[in-house]
Image (cartoon, grey):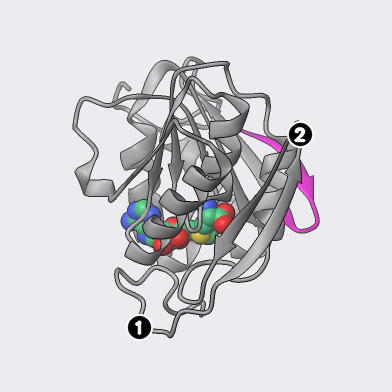
């Protein structure tokens, strides 16, 4: 499954499995499927992010980068019902699941899209992500900076990365690129990292471009 969870059109036979989520003030059931990340369970990293990220603002334009079956997007949509939550994924089956799961949960602000179909002028007040580290280091760094550059001037991104899959080197690299990136949680082999667009770059930044 790991080899193809980011395929555009998974070829594996559909095997829907429902998963319950109880986090903060919200509870919902969402459908997972083969060919989509974390089939049959809520990923431990995603769970840590959902439990420990600072509260989202009550409204605004949010992004779940790499939404999979949608547990992050649906949680954001229920926590902030008047926000617009862009749920982005290259995997068509993931997008279909997220749209279905948001509708079933009543998360009406969730807007599912392929990444390249988001209008150029959309900016994000908040991004929560369990990013696709398995697409490769260079690809993921490129993906992250592409979307981090679409934060509003006071926007915040929170993401969870497995320590064994390069969380600490990713944090160092982001700081070098001029993104003020803090580790806000470290637990069970995962790091939760936050980037606040309004903060000054950390010491160690070698960035020359202005953001
Ligand atoms: C680690 S999974 C997280 C899924 C979901 N957010 C969760 O926590 O269960 C990362 C997701 O990113 C998606 N992805 C891969 N490449 C992408 C890209 N270039 N743009 C957006 N999403 C991408 C994958 O298809 C996958 O669903």
| Residue 95 visible here | yes
Q: Is residue 184 magenta?
A: yes
Q: Nearer the viewer, residue 201 or 72?
A: 72
Pointer 2 residue: 24
Name the image quarter holding the C terminus.
top left
Q: Is residue 132 magenta?
A: no
Disc 2 is placed on an element classified as: loop
Read off the magenta span: 182-190
Give the quadrant of residue 22: top right
Can you give x and y, in whole percent of width and height, for residue 201 in the image? 49, 23
Specify the quarter for ligand 1.
Answer: bottom left
Can you give x and y, in whole percent of width and height, for residue 82 in the image? 49, 19
Q: Is residue 105 above or below residue 201?
A: below
**Disc 2 to disc 1, C-alpha distance:** 35 Å
Give the quadrant of residue 54: top right
Disc 1 is placed on an element classified as: loop
Q: What residue is rendered at 45% in x and 71% in y?
A: 5
Q: What residue is rendered at 50% in x and 76% in y?
A: 34
Q: Nearer the viewer, residue 52 or 26?
A: 26
Label 1 crowd bin: few (<14), some (14–19), many (20+), radius 10 Å? few
Q: What residue is rendered at 34% in x and 59% in y?
A: 139
Pointer 1 residue: 11
Q: Which mark is residue 196?
A: none
| Residue 132 visible here | no
């Amino acid at each position: 499954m790991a080899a193809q969870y980011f395929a555009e059109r998974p070829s594996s036979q559909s095997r829907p499995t429902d998963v319950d989520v109880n986090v903060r003030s919200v509870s919902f059931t969402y459908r997972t499927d083969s060919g989509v990340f974390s089939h049959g369970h809520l990923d431990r990293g995603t769970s840590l992010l959902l439990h420990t990220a600072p509260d989202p603002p009550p409204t605004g334009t949010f992004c779940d980068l790499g939404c999979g079956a949608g547990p992050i997007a649906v949680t954001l949509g229920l926590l902030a019902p008047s926000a617009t939550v862009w749920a982005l994924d290259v995997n068509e089956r993931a997008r279909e699941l997220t749209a279905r799961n948001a509708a079933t949960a009543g998360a009406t602000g969730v807007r599912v899209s392929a990444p390249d179909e988001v209008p150029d002028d959309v900016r994000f007040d908040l991004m929560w992500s369990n990013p696709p580290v398995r697409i490769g280091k260079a690809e993921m760094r490129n993906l992250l900076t592409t979307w981090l550059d679409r934060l509003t001037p006071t926007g915040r991104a929170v993401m969870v990365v497995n320590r064994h899959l390069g969380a600490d080197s990713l944090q160092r690299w982001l700081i070098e690129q001029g993104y003020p990136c803090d580790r806000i949680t470290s637990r069970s082999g995962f790091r939760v990292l936050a980037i606040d667009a309004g903060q000054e770059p950390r010491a160690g930044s070698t960035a020359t471009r202005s953001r």
